[in-house]
Every structure is written in C-alpha cells, then in structure tokens.
Amino acid sequence: MNKHELNKYAISLAEKSFQDRGFKIEDALPAAQVDFLAVLSSSKRMKIKVRAISQLGSYVFIPKRKFNIEDPDLYMVVQYIPHENNERIMYIIPATEWGKDIYPFKGKDYDKPGQVSEPEWGISFSGKAKDAMEPYRFTKYVMKLLADEDCRRLVSHINYFENNTKFYDVDEGGMHNNVIQLPCYHYNEGFINFIDDFYKSSLSEPNYLELIQPYLDKKLNLNDLIKSADYNLLRVIFTFNVRGEHFCDGFWAGALENKTFLNILYRLKELIE
C-alpha cells in the first residue's frame, strides 16, 4: 500500500473499532478538518483525525492550523500497521496532550531563517515512543471513556434517591389457604431504571462473590466500607447489592432502607470528579 492507501485503510479500521464499542460514526463537516466523528452520547462527540505508521522510526504530523490542541473534543488516532509482521496497534491521543510537554508529542515551528515548512504537531514513533504511548492504546483509553460515561449515567440517579422516600410496595406474606406465602416486593419504575442502567454499564464485577467474601467473613459493615472504597472495591459492593435480590426477595428493600445505593453513588461521584 502507498501512503494514501495506508491512511485510508487506517481510517476504516478506526471507524470499525469505535463502532464495535458502541459508538456511532458520523461524517465530519468540514471533512478536511477531521476524518470522522465518533459519537457516544449527546455529551460525548469525539472529533477524530487519523494518521498511519508502517515502521518504527517514522514521523507523523499534522499542520498546527488544522489541529487545535485547545479543543477538548479533538483526538488523533495513530494506527501502527507494520508491513513485515502481524503486530497492529491503535492509539488514541487527546489533542490537548500536545500542550502538556508530554513525550513523544511535540511541535515544530520552523521559525528559523531559511525554514519554510508550516508549523506542525507530530510524533516520532521510535521504540521508546512506542513504550511511552502504552497508556494511549485504543482499548485501554476507550474502555476508560466508556466507564466514565457509565459512571456519570449512574451518578445522575442521585436526584432520584434524594427526592424520593417510597421506592417499593410489598404484598405481605402469611398463611393463605394453608399455604405459607412469602412477602412479594414491587419496586417502582425509577428504581428499576437505575438497576437497568447498572446492568448496561461496565461496573458489574463478575467475581464479586469471591472478592467480597473476606469482608463478609470478618463481619465488616459494607456501608462503612463504601465511604473509603476505591473504584474496584466499590464495583464489588455495587454488584453484590444489585445481585442480592436475585438470591433473596426483599434484599433491595433492605439496601434502600439503609441508603446503601445512595451512598454508593455518592462515593462513585467522589471518585470520578
């Protein structure tokens, strides 16, 4: 592939990678400024400019007038597509990184006598640069974006919990026609929407039972742990409380009375702000 074909191929790979993770791809206007828009929600519209690299030692750049490093919605996707092996790496870098003196993101002004090239932002892609760009690998970076979006969506339910006092109705159990009937809980729509948003998010911890067991064995109060929990422990406690109703009818009712879900959301808000 020549340079033009390589970059066109890199754009198609980038679009597919975003789509595979739930983004909607839109054409950019004007097209010359960015290659496409990756839209996650009404609040997250990413302007994407793509550059392709085929070998270590390459230098990729973009004129400064076409890449505003003060734009928080602008990103450069760099595709490393080597000719000689199957190692293919995709990076995503916020434009603002070029304004922070972070290696290997640099600018060239060409302002010395005799220099006529246009000022540019660029990356010299060496082995050292490849290591330094590890935090910007597409999967790592986008998963963090998705997690942040999930957290914001869940935190938005704080108002619901703060402004409501009745979250469920209960049909009391008892003896009916010589049959013991257990209480039946009916949770309201707002709370069910909250639970649905949790299950749609990336916060669910598959191994929550194994991870929470040491705390249960020590008879620790989970509500007390919430106040200082880090992100990973909070995911465990969150999942434990959401999944609890599956094993015990009325589990959510107890968590609601103890304000467990509200406290989890308060802590989550602290962690993402």
Image (cartoon, rainbow, N blue to C red):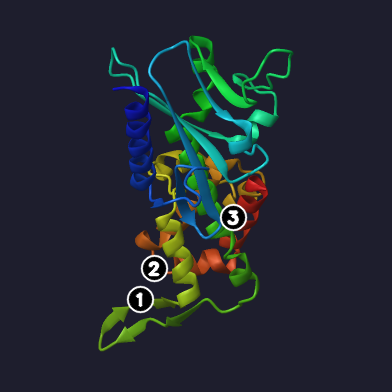
Q: Is residue 130 above or below residue 221?
A: above
At horizontal 64% and vertical 51% (from top left) the residue drawn is: 267
At horizontal 53% and vertical 63% (from top left) the residue drawn is: 255
Q: Give the image quarter of residue 70.
A: top right
Residue at numbered disc 2? 249
Q: Counting residues from the N terminus, which is met first, the one under dot 3 or under dot 1?
A: 1
Q: Characterize the local packing of mark 2: few (<14), some (14-19) or many (20 or more) Cα atoms within 10 angstroms.
A: some
Amino acid type of the residue that numbered disc 2 sits on in the rendered structure: Asp
Compute the Cα span from label 2 to label 3.
21 Å
- Residue 11 image position (x, y, % from top left): 38, 37
- Residue 101 image position (x, y, % from top left): 69, 23
The answer to which of 9 and 29 lies nearer the viewer is: 29
In contact (CB < 8 Å): disc 1 and disc 2? yes
In contact (CB < 8 Å): disc 3 and disc 1? no
Residue at numbered disc 3? 264
Residue at numbered disc 1? 182
Farthest residue in the bottom direction? 177
Amino acid type of the residue that numbered disc 1 sits on in the rendered structure: Leu
Q: Seen in the image, is 150 located left or right of residue 24?
A: right
